[in-house]
Amino acid sequence: MTYRIGLISDIHASPAPLKEALSIFKQQKVDMILCPGDIAGYGELLDETVELLIESQCQSILGNHEVWHLNKSGNNDNATTSYFNQLPDYLEFSIEGKKIYMVHANPPNSYEGGIRLLDEHGCIVSEQKTDWTKRLAEFDYDVLIVGHTHQVFAERLGSMLVINPGSTTYNHSCAILKLPDKSVQFFALSNIPIVKSWNWGTNQI
């Protein structure tokens, strides 16, 4: 039996591409939707974005922009703040015999830094891939799902498949992971070709 997981990330308070991704997931009949954070930031329609995630039963985690939002909002108790307050730092699952881990930047629970495998042209940097393969060698999972870097890839680092679905807003992308075979299909959004590497050279994203 094939289990389909819809992957979105770095939505940045822009609901239009999110709606498109959710429509794709509905058409493809996904079983679960995951988001590795950065729901907030940059865009101006955060409440609407959060409502869509709740309606779609998307399972999300905290990104650096949610942490910053909570730090700024203080005791402002509204639906969006309440939603962010209950998000975990990471999630892990066992699905179809595969162990899956999701974190915003890099494991075990970092919001900053992130796994960068691509250059500014969207090509794999072999030294980066080798470095991350070594750094994750003891991380015993079949699939690692990340966001943060605004890069789009599905790469095997050792025995583990590492996936970044890219930003729905800036990379114009989402993805579907199929288990147990660990295949990944990327989808372009907003009638724009997928930008594999966006915001090159900016550390704070």
Image (cartoon, helix red, strand yellow):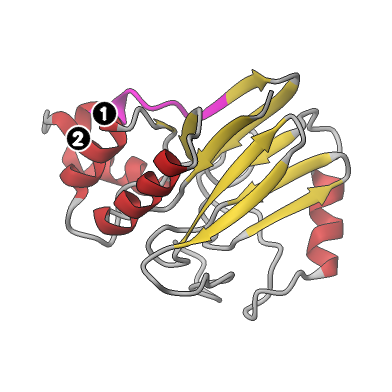
Q: Which residues are magenta?
A: 83-91
Viewer-nearest residue: 172 or 126: 172
Which residue type does callout 2 highlight?
A: Thr
Query: Which residue is painted at 32% across and 46% down in the image?
Result: 68
Quadrant of the rendering where the N terminus is positioned: top right
**Does residue 196 sit above or below 156 in this rendering?**
below
Q: Is residue 181 left or right of residue 47?
A: right
The reply to whether residue 57 is visible in this rendering is yes
Q: Position of residue 176 (x, y in %)?
A: 57, 44
**Mark linked to residue 83:** 1
Helix, strand or loop status at disc 1: helix
Q: Is residue 72 magenta?
A: no
Q: Count residues near mark 2 (Cα–Cα under 10 Å), then give few for <14, some for 14-19, many for 20+.
A: some
Q: Is residue 2 left or right of residue 136?
A: left
Quadrant of the rendering where the C terminus is positioned: bottom left
In the picture of the structure, the residue carrying the numbered disc 2 is 80
Q: In this view, which residue lies farthest toward the bottom? A: 121
Query: Which residue is painted at 64% across and 81% down in the image?
Result: 121
